[in-house]
Image (cartoon, rainbow, N blue to C red):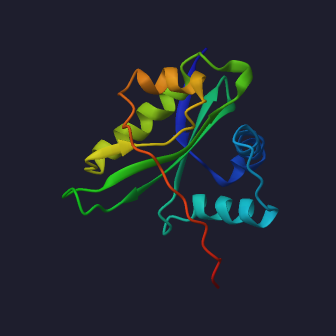
């Protein structure tokens, strides 16, 4: 199976959307249509700090990843946050997730980032096998305080 990792393009929406929905379903998350449209627009906006790659297999998009850069008080150079990663469940285990991570890693290195990081659920054992092949879990615990939306 040949594959190609490339940047997301506007004409990819109909192929990106089912993968995005699959990702949300996996994490038992529900977003409004408006939020999905906002995310889509941000992914395509070169002025917004949100980026996307897709992986194609035989011309079909089979995986997606979204990432952004952030400054840090702890490092001279930025960090790269790999926010979302999803590969069609029917073809997992064939290296597509690794291809996406490696592509973001290369982009982060080129951008001078001092760290590439991501989060996952402790129970996401299938993905953690892949992630553990890169590095050990950070040991950090994430806390979240929902804040009221502001206009």
- Of residues 74 and 53, the one nearer the viewer is 74
Where does residue 104 sit, x and y in percent of width and height? Answer: 43, 40
Q: Quadrant of residue 121?
A: top right
Q: How many marks?
A: 0
Q: Residue furthest left?
A: 76
Q: Which residue extends farthest bottom?
A: 151
Q: Quadrant of the N terminus?
A: top right
The answer to which of 22 and 128 lies nearer the viewer is: 128
For residue 52, side relative to residue 62 (left or right) = left
Question: Is 125 positioned to the left or the right of 102 in the image?
Answer: right
In the rendered image, residue 69, in percent from the top left (x then y), is placed at 39, 57
Q: Is residue 23 left or right of residue 144?
A: right
Residue 60, horizontal then vertical, whole percent:
70, 30
Query: Which residue appears farthest toward the right when viewing the image?
Result: 33
| 14 over 4 or under it: above or below | below
- Residue name at image x 38 percent, y 50 percent: 80
- Please state, as top left, top right, bottom left or bottom right, where the C terminus lies in the image: bottom right
Q: Residue at x 65, y 61 (%)?
A: 39
């Amino acid at each position: 199976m040949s594959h190609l990792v490339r940047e997301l393009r506007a004409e990819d929406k109909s192929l990106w959307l089912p993968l995005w929905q699959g990702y949300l379903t996996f994490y038992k998350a529900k977003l409004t249509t408006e939020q999905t449209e906002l995310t889509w627009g941000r992914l395509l906006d070169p002025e917004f700090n949100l980026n996307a790659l897709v992986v194609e297999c035989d011309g079909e998009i089979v995986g997606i990843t979204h990432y952004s850069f952030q400054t840090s008080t702890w490092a001279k150079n930025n960090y790269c946050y790999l926010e979302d990663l999803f590969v069609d469940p029917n073809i997992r285990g064939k290296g597509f997730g690794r291809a996406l991570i490696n592509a973001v890693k290369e982009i982060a290195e080129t951008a001078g980032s001092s760290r590439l990081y991501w989060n996952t659920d402790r129970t996401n054992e299938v993905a953690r096998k892949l992630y553990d092949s890169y590095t050990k879990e950070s040991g950090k615990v994430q806390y979240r305080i929902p804040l009221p939306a502001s206009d």
